[in-house]
Image (cartoon, rainbow, N blue to C red):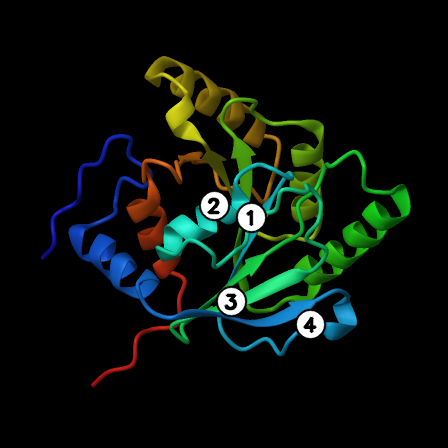
Amino acid sequence: MAKPLTITPSLLGDLTEAEIEAGRLLFARECDFFWGAEAATTLPEAILPEICFAGRSNVGKSSLVNALTGRKTLARTSQTPGRTQQLNFFSLGQRLVLVDMPGYGYAQVSKERSAAWTDFIRAYLRGRVTLKRALVLVDARHGLKPHDVDMMKMMDQTAVGYQIVLTKADTLKPGGMDKIRAQVAQALKTHGAAHPEVLATSAETGLGIPELRAFLTRMAEPAALG
């Protein structure tokens, strides 16, 4: 039997060495873009378990997805915040689908476009039967912002279970990280669909990446035998 793995900082206390390895193996497999959807009517067929990534523009969402999959250009980073205007679907080893959602909160996006995105995302969240978990990415340097809270409320309303993942954790000192995690965890107590644990990651140093892979692998389609 695998022993519980002690990790600092610990993301999920009951992760085992076997789960960490399973996560490494899954995220080392081919991860290919297969669909882009700009409206609810153009979503792909829901077959495999899905994990969606949400966050403000420039929160480091693409960098985190690239770090998880060990690639540099899977989810392309943009020099123009708010540029991504569709849901991008990636198949990971035919066992899990990663969904890169449009960044939100960029001031130069028109109100009409922002409203259309909101309606689209709400429809996706409400009707996607294969959506296992949403990850709401929050910049560790700034904590929760109003647009993050708006996204969290939408997920509460659509009954989508979600987890807060702090990005750019390497930019904070240990005391600062403890403080921001405590602040976010306190805020989550008023959100019914939120998982209470706040995860900390860094795409630059790899902090928290193996643990997040293992956590997401728990929700993947079981590996084929033989």
Per the image, label 1 sits on a secondary structure element best described as loop
Total numbered circles: 4
Q: Are marks 4 and 3 in contact (CB under 8 Å)?
A: no
At 84% from the left and 54% from the top, the residue drawn is 116
Which disc is residue 58 wearing? none
Give the amino acid at mark 2: Ser
Label 2 sits on residue: 63
Q: Nearer the viewer, residue 5 or 191?
A: 5
Q: Residues within 10 Å of mark 3 (few under 14, many from 20)?
A: many
- Find residue 90 and name its label: 3
- For residue 175, side relative to residue 1 (left or right): right
Dot 1 alpha-carbon crowd within 10 angstroms: few under 14, some 14 to 19, many 20 or more:
some
The secondary element bearing badge 2 is classed as helix
Alpha carbons under labels 3 and 1: distance apart: 15 Å
Q: Do the residues under discs 2 and 1 have CB atoms within 8 angstroms?
A: yes
Looking at the image, which residue is at 85% across and 48% down? 115
The structure residue drawn at horizontal position 65% and vertical position 27%, both measured from the top left corner, is 145
177 relative position to 112: left or right:
left
Q: Estimate the x, y position of residue 195 in percent, counting from the top left.
A: 49, 41
The amino acid sitting under disc 1 is Thr
Name the amino acid type tagged 3: Phe
Number of the label disc, if any, that sits on residue 43: 4
Q: Which residue is mark 1?
A: 77
As measured in the structure, the alpha-carbon distance from the residue carrying label 4 to the one carrying label 3 is 13 Å
Q: How far apart are the two marked residues, 2 and 4, measured between alpha carbons?
A: 24 Å
Asked whether the beta carbons under mark 3 and mark 1 sit within 8 Å of each other, the answer is no
Q: Measured from the top left, where is residue 124 in percent x and y?
A: 69, 62
**Residue 102 in the figure: left or right of residue 69:** right
Q: Quadrant of residue 128?
A: bottom right
